[in-house]
Image: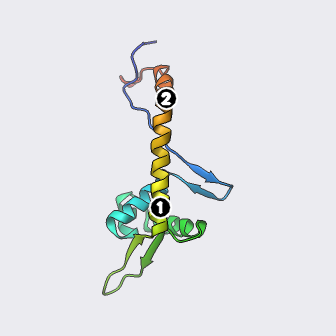
Amino acid sequence: MSDDTPSSEARLRLRIFFGDDVMLGPGKADLLEHIRETGSIAAAGRSMKMSYKRAWSLVEEMNRSYRQPLVDSSRGGTKGGGASLTEAGESVLAHYRRIETIIAREAAEEISGLQTMLVDMSDGK
């Protein structure tokens, strides 16, 4: 076994479960960010290689799960549709990203310790 640190970087993927029915994780957080950036649920889904139906389903799930909707959307048509994060959506996303940062910072030493114990897979073996 080599003493070298494996070449791949460790990543944390935070999933927060609220009871048995509500979960917020990296996919939903990324979808919220992409909706903010694109102004469209469809475009956000496409940019994440996610079907339109899946993106809409996740938005509907998030909107049902919180006291206030996270995404406000309007139908397409001659003026075009669109979507934007509500104040609640911005707040939920900000809380999630801060939690990610805190956990990554606090767990860095432990993750590094785990990583040093991994087998070196850099040569594809």
Give the residue at x 48% y 27%.
109
Left or right position of 79 against 41: left
Relative to 15, residue 54 above or below = below
Image coords of residue 56 (percent x, y)? 48, 69
Q: Amino acid at mark 1?
A: Ser
Do the residues bearing badges 2 and 1 touch, measured as CB atoms within 8 Å?
A: no
Q: Residue furthest bottom?
A: 78
What separation in Å lies between label 2 and label 1 (alpha carbons)? Answer: 28 Å
Res. 92 visible in picture: yes
Image coords of residue 20 (percent x, y)? 68, 55
Task: Please state, as top left, top right, bottom left or bottom right, where the C terminus lies in the image.
Answer: top left
Q: Amino acid at mark 2?
A: Ile
Give the residue at x 62% y 52%.
17
Give the residue at x 46% y 31%.
108
Q: Secondary structure at mark 2?
A: helix
Q: Secondary structure at mark 1?
A: helix
Relative to 27, residue 102 above or below = above
Res. 53 visible in picture: no
Of tags 2 and 1, the one toward the viewer is 1
Image coords of residue 61 (percent x, y)? 56, 66
Going from N to C along the chain, the mark reached first, 2 or 1, is 1
Q: Residue furthest right?
A: 20
Which numbered circle lies on residue 91? Answer: 1
Colouring mode (rainbow / by chain / secondary structure / one colour): rainbow
Image coords of residue 4 (percent x, y)? 39, 16
**Disc 1 residue crowd, few under 14, some 14–19, many 20+, Cα 10 Å:** few
Q: Which residue is mark 2?
A: 111
> Which image quarter: residue 3?
top left
> Which image quarter: residue 8?
top left
Give the residue at x 47% y 65%.
89
**Disc 2 residue crowd, few under 14, some 14–19, many 20+, Cα 10 Å:** some
In front here: 98 or 71? 98
